[in-house]
Structure formats: C-alpha cells, structure tokens
Image: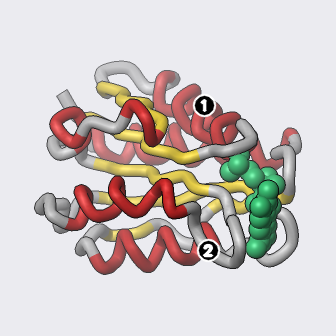
Amino acid sequence: MPKVAIVYSSGMGRTKKMAEAVAEGVQTVEGVDLVLQSRNEFNIDDVKDADAIALGGGTYSGSLTHAMDTLLQVLKETDLKAKVGAAFGSYGWSGEGVPMLIDHLKEMGLNVIEPGIKAKQTPDREALEACFMLGRALAEGVKG
Ligand SMILES: Cc1cc2nc3c(=O)[nH]c(=O)nc-3n(C[C@H](O)[C@H](O)[C@H](O)COP(=O)(O)O)c2cc1C
C-alpha cells in the first residue's frame, strides 16, 4: 500500500500539533498507510519504504534542535531518492528550521514540495488547515 511517513521533533508541542494535522489530512484518503513518529519514536524501518516523507521541526537558536541530528543522519544514510518530501514547523521570530529541513530533504534527493509550512508560535487554525491540506495532498499524490 502507498505510504506517507511523518517524523517530527517538538520541544513545546507546537510542531507536534502541526504533525498531527498533517496526519489527519493523510487519514482522509483511503488506501494509504500512515506512519507518525516523534523523534523519540523514530524508526527508520517504518520510514524507509514510505513514498512521501514529511519532516517537522521547530526553530531553536537559528537552527533545528541538536536532537534532530541523529534522525537526519540516519535518514541521510538511507536511500530516499525520488520520494516526495515536505517540511513544516513552528518558530518564534526567525524561522530557519523549515528552510533547513527543506535543504536536508533536497540533499537526500527527495522531490520537495515548496514552500514548507511555518507557524508562528502556537499554530493557528489557518496553519493547521494548511498542514491538513498538505497531508491530504501527500496521500493523494502517493496513491496516484
Ligand atoms: C531556547 C529557545 C530558542 C529559540 N530560538 C529561536 C530562534 O532562533 N528563532 C525562532 O524563530 N524561534 C526560536 N525559538 C522559538 C521556538 O521556535 C517556538 O517557541 C516554537 O513554537 C517551538 O515549537 P516546537 O518546540 O513545538 O517545535 C526558540 C525557543 C526557545 C525555547
């Protein structure tokens, strides 16, 4: 079955809310498997066979959290070429996290949907709706 994987890191639960909204969007499309994993739950075996991968991460000190380093390293060591990629995340003022995730995804060879989705602090209804629509689009895309 076609599959969408969502992997995120969220210190304050805001990027997590976005991840859950992406997942809800995926679930509206029948016949598509969903994997939703926080950084702590991350298991490459469940992600490597996904057709689309959405990465979520907040911005911390002008970057992603170091907590994402290992996750990104494992993804980079996996052949993810030609899968579809997308990025989302919450930020406070500068918001480097999402563009950095997009760069990482491109470096891994994924075809990235741009721009990613950024939400200032707690994602509002509009941001969550955008996440939901992203999830639905990813699921419809992988279903073909
Ligand atoms: C220690 C710390 C550093 C932060 N640094 C930045 C930053 O450099 N730029 C920015 O846009 N937001 C920054 N933020 C704000 C967070 O990105 C924002 O609170 C976001 O909502 C966190 O969501 P998440 O933990 O659910 O991903 C920082 C927050 C903290 C606590």
> In terms of secondary structure, where does tag 2 sit?
loop
Q: Return the x and y of residue 121 as percentages of the image width and height.
A: 85, 53
Q: Nearer the viewer, mark 1 or mark 2?
A: 2
On screen, 110 above or below 122? Answer: below
Please tell me which residue is depicted at 67% across the width and 44% down the height of the picture.
11
Quadrant where the N terminus lies?
top left
In this rendering, position of residue 3 left or right of residue 49: right
In this rendering, position of residue 7 left or right of residue 142: right
Quadrant where the C terminus lies?
top left
On screen, 75 above or below 8? Answer: below
Tell me the tag on residue 133. none
In this rendering, position of residue 36 left or right of residue 59: left
Which residue corresponds to mark 2?
63
Q: Is residue 116 visible?
A: yes
Quadrant field for ligand 1: bottom right
Disc 2, ligand 1: is the CB inside 8 Å?
yes
Tell me the tag on residue 20. 1
The image's colouring method is: secondary structure
Q: Is residue 119 visible?
A: no
Please tell me which residue is depicted at 36% across the width and 27% down the height of the picture.
34
> In terms of secondary structure, where does tag 1 sit?
helix
Asked if the residues shown at circle 1 and circle 2 are in contact, with their CB atoms under 8 angstroms apart, the answer is no
How packed is label 2: few (under 14 Cα within 10 Å), some, or many (20 or more)?
some
